[in-house]
Image: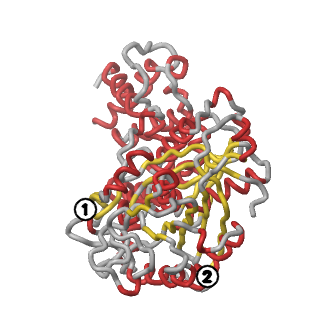
Amino acid sequence: MLQERIVITGIGLTSPLGNDLASFREKLLAGESGVSTFPVRNMGDQPAGVCDFEQTKYQKRKEVRIGTRAGGIGIYCAHEALANAGLSLSEIDPSKVGVYLGITEHGNVETETEVCQLFDHYSEEVKYWSHHHNPRTVANNPAGEITINLGLTGPHYTVGAACAAGNAGIIQGVQMLSLGECDWALAGGVSESIRAYGIFAGFKSQGALAAHEDPTKASRPFDRGRNGIVVSEGGCIYVLERLKDALKRGANIIAEIMGYRINSDGTDYVLPNPERQEQCIRQALDRAEIEASMVDLVSSHATSTPQGDEQECKALRNVFSEETGTLINNTKSFIGHSMGAAGALELAGNIPSFIDGTAHGTINLDDLDPSCALPGLVMNEAKEKKGGINVILNNSFGMLGINSVLILKKFVG
Amino acid sequence: MNKDKVKQIVLDIIAEIAPDEDLSDVKPEIRLRDQLDLDSMDFLDIVMELRKQHSIDVPEAEYRQLESLESCGNYLLPKFEATAA
């Protein structure tokens, strides 16, 4: 049980499938892929998830020039989340707002750009190295840019948690609200990773980069033809509040945080560990004080790699079964792997199921891998669940063996 | 090269680094910071773009020579002429 009841009162996002929750959800239910291609330095066009939000909606052109893509994504999502929560910064104390953003990595984009420019145009003379490099690459950059843009004066930092970061940012917000460090938490995750060729090259060298002649078919978790990750950009930020405060101001409560857990494999740099994943899920269930059978929907982490998907399925199969009646789906099949944003963005895509009682599908499942044939797997088409969807469990795992699980429930006043 | 051309080059650089600013009525004699929203990092950008685009180096001790459009013209013209020579 959580020390303090924490609720979600606002959601702001940008994804390869839309720049607000309603359009994102609509396309998930319609089974539409958001993956296209992106020109990657030294590697040509690659399947990727690209966002098309209007960056100057909330930033001056000069801010866009000086800041980072991750910062711009964060600023867009933060504004949208506050508006969705019905919060006006002129009416609240900016020192009471904390910003906690999950990131898989940060700084690769800017560093690569500087190094490449130096080599390509300036004979490696360091006097051409940008004075913007350090403020762009410090690890708190995306969260810090949000505070500058919005004039927030509470705490801000990022949480580095590989691809478990989206959940980790939300969990950090929950904890800081429980400790009374802030009254509102802007918490979630962001990713600008498609703009760093090293990310693509690293996955390719690892044998974990997706390739397909049709980019919309490249991200295919649980399918026998899956061959790797589609790298995506995106962001999702939630407004979190203590329940008592949200009720006091008459906020629209979207969902309640029920439980969470982060643990470590302690075994390998890249290979997942299904035992520790299962343990993480069970410990999150314990904290939420529920049985697996109470989980209506699992938003799986599976990234479309041959080994990773199979390992997560082992963990899920040990917890969820025909008897638990739990549905399992996967959002990466639609938008690719949005890295630091993934956990937060995938959760957001599923939150409307509290209202419509429907789990979106897992697309590109043309030839289900028998080792991934989970009971309850929602294949291709969206599926309505009898009795509705009242509890969602969100998996998000990352390199160096970091596992994160977040459990939400439908808020009943 | 003449002073007016140098001033236009500086204005073109400012247009790149401060794209939200209205540069249609910049007063040559008034400090740029007093009429435009420019901070110290922006002046470093001006210095960097002079270096990158025109191979002109401005030593740190001489940054103050860039404080107005007029002073830019006076200070940079000999450097542009030397570069062209």
Looking at marks 1 and 2 on the same chain, the residue that comes earlier in the sequence is marked by: 1
Q: CA distance from mark 1 to mark 2?
A: 36 Å
Residue drawn at x 61%, y 34% as measured from the top left: A87
Residue type highlighted by circle 1: Asp
Q: Secondary structure at mark 1?
A: strand
Whether residue A190 appears in this view of the structure is no
Residue projecting furthest to the left: A213
Q: Residues within 10 Å of mark 2 (few under 14, many from 20)?
A: some
Q: Return the chain for callout 1.
A: A
Q: Secondary structure at mark 2?
A: helix
Residues A298 and A276: in front is: A298
Q: Which mark is residue A190?
A: none
Q: Nearer the viewer, mark 1 or mark 2?
A: 2
Left of A207 or right of it: where is A351?
right
Q: Are marks 1 and 2 in contact (CB under 8 Å)?
A: no
Q: Which mark is residue A276?
A: 2
A360 to B21, vertically: above or below: below
From the top left corner, tell me how far across and down residue A8 is, in percent: 61, 48
Quadrant where the image shows the N terminus of chain B: top left
From the top left corner, tell me how far across and down residue A405 is, in percent: 60, 68
Residues A104 and B59: in front is: A104
Residue type highlighted by circle 2: Arg
Quadrant where the image shows the C terminus of chain B: top left
Residues A213 and B10: in front is: A213
Q: Return the chain for callout 2.
A: A
According to the image, label 1 marks what residue? A45
Q: Within the image, what quadrant is residue A334 found in?
A: bottom left
From the top left corner, tell me how far across and down residue B39 is, in percent: 55, 30
B44 to A69, vertically: above or below: above
Q: Residues within 10 Å of mark 1 (few under 14, many from 20)?
A: few
Residues A115 and A98: in front is: A98
From the top left corner, tell me how far across and down residue A283 is, in percent: 68, 74
